[in-house]
Image (cartoon, rainbow, N blue to C red):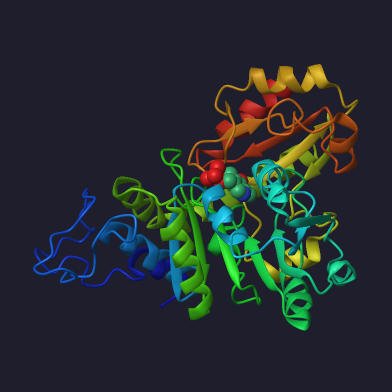
């Protein structure tokens, strides 16, 4: 099956033997009756498994070209499960330009349990090998990065991992499997905040993991059940519904993203535009190689790098909503320096390019003329 068919049918055949419903029923139940102790029909308790969640997990595996999918209560719960594969003394090499919540989980929770994290710029993936030692167990890659849209070469990271017997996990939230399929490029684990593009309608918080290896899947399933950060059947249904339009939503996100990136590039008040589809993007060649298109996430900086002007622009937007999060059908704008990255000291955040006037857009699927006119009036 091709991708555009998998988003709709992947893992969904014979979904309801009882009545043939086309969508799986929402099995709003915590438990399942047994004919004799242990005599059940595949499900015994909804933390361990639920048919609606199982339908979603099969769909997730299918669209990422993996064998096993696991759905969690949030993206961070999915990451938490991956790090619980490790033991005190183990080391992780991670992208430095990282989703803030992931950074907080690594440094404020797991460092306290004796796991060591090395945060490095991975745009030159050959650098990864310099940090691998006998204690390294995991390489954590996020690409494109947030909010600077750097691109990391997944194949090169996979080579570094394979050469040293280390696991490679890729946070595929920004790209989605429509744009890149990390397992095919050599990753061992794909992670998603399904809250974003997979759900796609800003109405649910959820996370996901997809893997190929049976033994790794078994370990992650053990953690999913033992730690218990699972998602409910209603949310599973919503994300499954969202997936069915992922391909057409992504197509429009990309089309609108390209038009807006080019509009910003030629705007006299704009200094820099960060979008991997632009030819002068520093990692454009890798992006072209590993992605099918370039997505709808764009960051930009106005000339003069004025903090107050950036605040004025995001406040003046009318079609774009000023809000955290991304990946929904509606366009959102954010000001990282005062919102997502406010907790990082100014000097630190400026090192990675998160300057005072940086604005991040999650370009939605509205009519692009309305989006461009909105940016025109807000930038002035
Ligand atoms: C939002 C996000 C997360 C965290 O996911 P939640 O669903 O909010 O827990 C992780 N990584 C990236 C890239 C994200 O955008």
263 displayed left or right of 329: right
Q: In which quadrant will I find the C terminus? A: top right
Which image quadrant for residue 344? top right
Q: In the picture provided, is 268 more to the left or to the right than 319?
A: right
Residue 327 visible (yes or no): no
Q: Name the residue: 83% across, 61% down.
A: 123
Residue 112 on image: x %, y %: 71, 47
Please state the horizontal and vertical placement of residue 225, each as a whole percent of the image: 41, 59
From the top left corner, tell me how far across and down residue 322 is, in percent. Answer: 60, 26
- The N terminus lies in quadrant: bottom left
* Residue sitting farthest toward the bottom: 163
Quarter of the image holding residue 61? bottom left
In the image, taking residue 153 as reference, residue 363 lies left or right, namely left
Which of these two is toward me, 370 or 272? Answer: 272
Q: Nearer the viewer, residue 252 or 227?
A: 227
Counting the numbered discs, the total is 0
When asked about the image quadrant of residue 353, the answer is: top right
Q: Residue at x 62, y 26 (%)?
A: 374
Residue 129 appears left or right of 172: right
| Residue drawn at x 71%, y 29% as measured from the top left | 335
Residue 141: x and y, percent? 71, 61
**Residue drawn at the location 39% of the way across and 51% of the way down:** 239
Whether residue 144 is visible to the viewer of this picture, yes or no, is yes
């Amino acid at each position: 099956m091709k991708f555009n068919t998998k988003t709709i049918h992947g893992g969904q055949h014979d979904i309801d033997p009882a009545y043939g419903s086309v969508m799986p029923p929402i099995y709003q139940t915590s438990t399942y009756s047994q004919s004799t102790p242990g005599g059940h029909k595949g499900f015994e308790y909804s933390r361990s498994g639920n048919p609606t969640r199982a339908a979603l997990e099969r769909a997730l595996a299918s669209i990422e070209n993996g064998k096993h999918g696991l759905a969690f209560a949030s993206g961070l719960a999915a990451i938490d499960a991956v790090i619980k594969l490790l033991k005190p003394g183990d080391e992780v090499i991670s992208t430095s330009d990282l989703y803030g919540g992931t950074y907080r989980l690594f440094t404020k929770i797991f460092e306290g349990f004796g796991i060591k994290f090395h945060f490095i710029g991975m745009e030159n993936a050959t650098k990864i090998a310099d940090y691998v030692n006998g204690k390294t167990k995991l390489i954590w890659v996020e690409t494109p990065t947030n909010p600077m849209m750097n691109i990391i070469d997944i194949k090169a990271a996979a080579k570094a991992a394979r050469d040293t017997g280390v696991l490679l996990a890729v946070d595929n939230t920004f790209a989605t499997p429509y744009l890149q399929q990390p397992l095919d490029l050599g990753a061992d684990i794909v992670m998603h905040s399904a809250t974003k593009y997979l759900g796609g309608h800003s109405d649910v918080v959820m996370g996901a993991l997809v893997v190929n290896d049976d033994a790794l899947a078994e370990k992650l399933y053990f953690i999913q059940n033992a730690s218990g950060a699972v998602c409910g059947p209603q949310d599973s249904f919503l994300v499954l519904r969202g997936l069915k339009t992922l391909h057409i939503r992504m197509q429009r996100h990309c089309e609108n993203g390209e038009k807006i990136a080019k509009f910003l590039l030629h705007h006299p008040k704009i200094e820099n535009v960060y979008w991997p589809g632009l030819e002068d993007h520093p990692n454009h060649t890798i992006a072209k190689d590993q992605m099918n298109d370039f997505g709808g996430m764009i960051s930009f900086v106005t000339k003069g790098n004025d903090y107050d002007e950036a605040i004025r622009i995001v406040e003046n937007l009318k079609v774009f909503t000023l809000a955290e999060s991304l990946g929904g059908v509606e366009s959102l704008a954010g000001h990282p320096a005062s919102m997502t990255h406010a907790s990082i000291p100014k000097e630190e955040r400026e090192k990675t390019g998160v300057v005072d006037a940086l604005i991040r857009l999650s370009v939605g699927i509205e009519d692009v003329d309305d989006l461009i006119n909105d940016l025109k009036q807000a930038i002035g």
